[in-house]
Amino acid sequence: MTVAMEDTETKAVSGAEIRLENVTKRYPNTKAAAVDEFSMVIPAGRIVVFVGPSGCGKTTTMRMINRMVEPTSGVITIGGKDALHIDADELRRGIGYAIQQAGLFPHFTVAQNIAVVPGLLKWDKKKIDARVDEMMDLVGLDPGTFRHRLPRQLSGGQQQRVGVARALAADPPVLLMDEPFGAVDPITRGNLQDELLRLQNELGKTIVFVTHDFDEAVKLGDKIAVLGDRSTIQQYDTPDAILANPANDTVAGFVGAGASLKQLTLLRVRDVPFDTDNVIAVDHGDAPAQVAEKLRLADRAYALVLDERQRPLRWVHRRELAGRTSLLDAGKPVGDSVTTQSTLQDALEAILTEGGRAVVTGARGELIGTIDISTVTDVIANVRETHADGGSA
Amino acid sequence: MDLWQYVSERWDRLSLQALLHVSGVVQCTIIAAIIGVVVGVLVYRSSVGSAVATALASTILTVPSFALLGLLIPFLGLGVAPSVTALVLYGLLPIVRNTIVGLNGVDPAVTDAAKGIGMGRLGVLTRVELRMAWPAILTGMRVSAQMLMGIAVIAAYAKGFGLGSEVFSGLTRAGSANSLNQALAGTLGVVILALILDAVFVLIARLTIPKGVRD
């Protein structure tokens, strides 16, 4: 049996590479620089998350990219072009910008808010109207319902969506996001994060995302930069590598407890070698006696009952088969199952719920295998070993 | 002769005076608004500048209107010039102060976003900040206009425009025929005009304050 390959990772990249070289910000009348000799390459079409404690300079660093903060010295290029020697307003019109409270213009409707940057770029009216509708669809707001609403008539989550739509309206290659989901409730935040990932899958922008929430960084980042005081880079790597092998105590402190559990959110069932033939599967029409015999021959305790379309229905134990006429009322129903798309964290939850072994299903709910706790522990051990080698090399 | 009779017999003159009064006040309010908003825009970002501008404007207001007019006459002579100057100066404080308060009250996240998506300085000011500060500025103008309605009466002392001349000549001729009627007609006229002008301001607020900014 093969694992379904639904998720082809061919992203269109419309983003541009950002390079920061020895970028320093020194405020007048202060001894220490706020950002000291910061150098980093942010690859095109990727999400890079700046994460660090409050006041570490991560926001200042991000704001130097669109010159909301003018660097004192250093070089910043976007897509190879020098960002520091062109008109700042021109530069900003080519960079999407989304901030914490969304910063929507309260006296503009949703459509007017989204249309600001295309308007500044002097697009013609028809093109702007079409673009506004397109952006609203993209962020999941029905244009018919929301076009003429005012920001204050929207929920916090909806305002953030409009903020993201406004940032993307002129199709900028680069998007800067400063804790954009910081002010919404956890459930909405989760949804917005999922949607940002979906959008990014379609758009392939270069996104610089600032947060102090490490879990958010792990979820969203292709790469994470853990920043310390004065924006010094403590570690700049994939979430995977940072979780498995924090570079120093500062990073370890930031990763916090439960690094292994967080690691599980990064891996999907399709990425790990789950069992595809380690279960006795029987049809719901089979006679219980026949199944009992089958289990006895295989020396197994449990059988998995499938329906006519191969979807798992129930677990039955050998002892429960005696005297039954149908498999449909024996044993217990399958409670929690996972798909190949599920994260290992979901899988672990299902394994614990199901008591040791969870069912893995395919796109149509059909049985394609099972996963147990040893698979999960093996995977974690493996990841740690890989990054430990990489780190010491 | 009762007041009613007095007013109807001299309606032509009184209505002209009333018109001059209100139009003078409105024009002075507009001039004060233009100057006040410009001053407010220039100083609102600096706390020192804001404090100085507000203090200056308050100082003007503490000078009694009689004295101010008296001081202006040697420089500007009699007539419209000293009256308009005095009224504009008096009208400044509420407008300057409210402009500063209004502009400082704009949510920093909104101006940050406006700047961050590439609106120029002037764009941020005219399309965002002033639009959002407009309710406060308009309130300042309304207060100024009310105040100037009364102060404009004193302007008659400098041979200015409006109903003040009725009040003044009524008072100086106190005791003679119709003097009370004349002073009363002038005073009541000012009160009625002030009420009407206030209603007009409410209407302007209705029409010009964007829905998203209105409470």
Image (cartoon, rainbow, N blue to C red):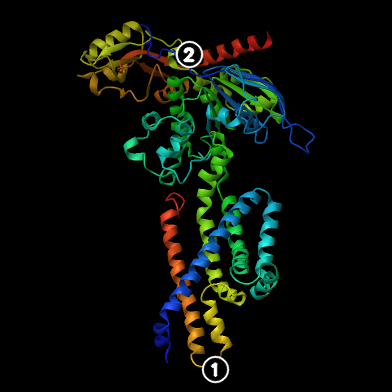
What residue appears at the point 65 percent right and 68 percent down from the top-left corner? Answer: B61
Q: Is residue B117 found left or right of A321 in the rendered image?
A: right
Q: Can residue A246 be seen in this snapshot?
A: no
Q: Nearer the viewer, residue A88 or B193?
A: B193
Q: Quadrant of residue B63?
A: bottom right
Q: Quadrant of the C terminus of chain B?
A: bottom left
Q: Is residue B10 found left or right of A95 in the rendered image?
A: left
- Find residue B39 and report its horizontal and vertical position in percent: 63, 53
Q: Quadrant of residue A83?
A: top right
What residue appears at the point 57 percent right and 41 percent down from the top-left corner? Answer: B122
Q: Relative to residue A282, is residue A106 depicted above or below? A: below
- Asked if marks 2 and 1 touch (Cβ < 8 Å), the reply is no
Q: Is residue A5 found left or right of A184 in the rendered image?
A: left
| Residue ID for mark 2 | A375
List the single residue furthest toward the right: A31
| Amino acid beneath label 2 | Thr
| Residue ID for mark 1 | B175
Secondary structure beneath dot 1 equals loop
Q: Quadrant of residue B208?
A: bottom left
| Amino acid beneath label 1 | Gly
Q: Relative to residue B157, is residue A55 depicted above or below? A: above
